[in-house]
Image (cartoon, rainbow, N blue to C red):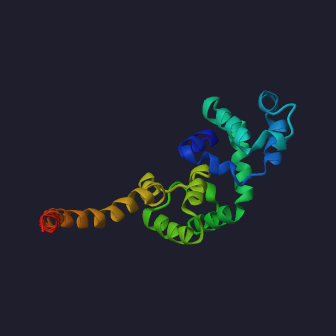
Amino acid sequence: MTSVESLVLLGDLFERVVKPLDLGLIIQHVRSLATPVYIRHFKGFRPQTLGRKRITQSLHFEVFEKGNETVADILVLLWNQKMRHLFNAMADHVKTINENVEEVESIPDDKANEFLDDMLFRFDREDVLICVRINDVRFSPEVIARRLEGILEDAEPEEAEPVSETSEEAEPGSETSDEAKIEVDNTEVSE
């Protein structure tokens, strides 16, 4: 999987990839490795005057619209350097399967769940998802969807169920209690 494909899979988390990175360092790398991109977006501006929003939009355009592999590689490299504690923790887990992590074809679901239990305890879910996607950690798509992408989706119905159960129980009772209130109100008004 290429860096562009990895970042495209992240979609809305792209801004979270760019957020911790030093803007000056990004522009410096783009200037030396992707000169046309530098000229198109950043030439003639100081990083301080461009602002994070404009730089993020420019990088988003290059990765998502142009499919610029060099810019995507720069972002992956800088993110891994900035978040090295997370990257190293994931690499240490994968090394328990094979010392040469590049040779790992797939990670069994039970091992993946074990790794993710530890990683999610120590790090933010979105950062773990970013690490898994951009470094092409060989978890099964089901594990990634269930444990990393689906946590919020799974949590919402659980929170919604007690509300809906109480609302279902309250509906029949609340109708009678509403009717009773109306009757009481009418009685009070008529008295």
Kindly tell me whether residue 1 is visible in this rendering. Answer: no
Q: How far across and down, in percent of the image, does residue 6 sit?
A: 58, 44
Which quarter of the rendering shows the N terminus?
top right
Residue 10, horizontal then vertical, whole percent: 55, 46
Looking at the picture, tell me which residue is in the foreground, 80 or 92: 80
Task: Identify which residue, 177 or 50, lies in the foreground.
Answer: 177
Q: Is residue 31 above or below residue 78?
A: above
Q: Quadrant of residue 178?
A: bottom left
Tell whether 129 sits left or right of 171. right
- Most extreme residue toward the front, as rendered? 191
What x and y, as percent, mark residue 162? 29, 67
The residue shown at (61%, 30%) is 65
Residue shown at 87%/39% (left/top)? 46
Q: Quadrant of the C terminus?
A: bottom left
Residue beneath the point at 44% across and 60% down: 151
Is 80 rendered above or below residue 187?
above
- Please state if 158 lies on the left or on the right of 69 as rendered: left
Q: Can residue 61 be seen from the camera position used here? A: yes
- Identified at 59% across, 71% down, the residue is 122
Q: Position of residue 90 (x, y in %)?
A: 61, 64
Number of marks in the image?
0
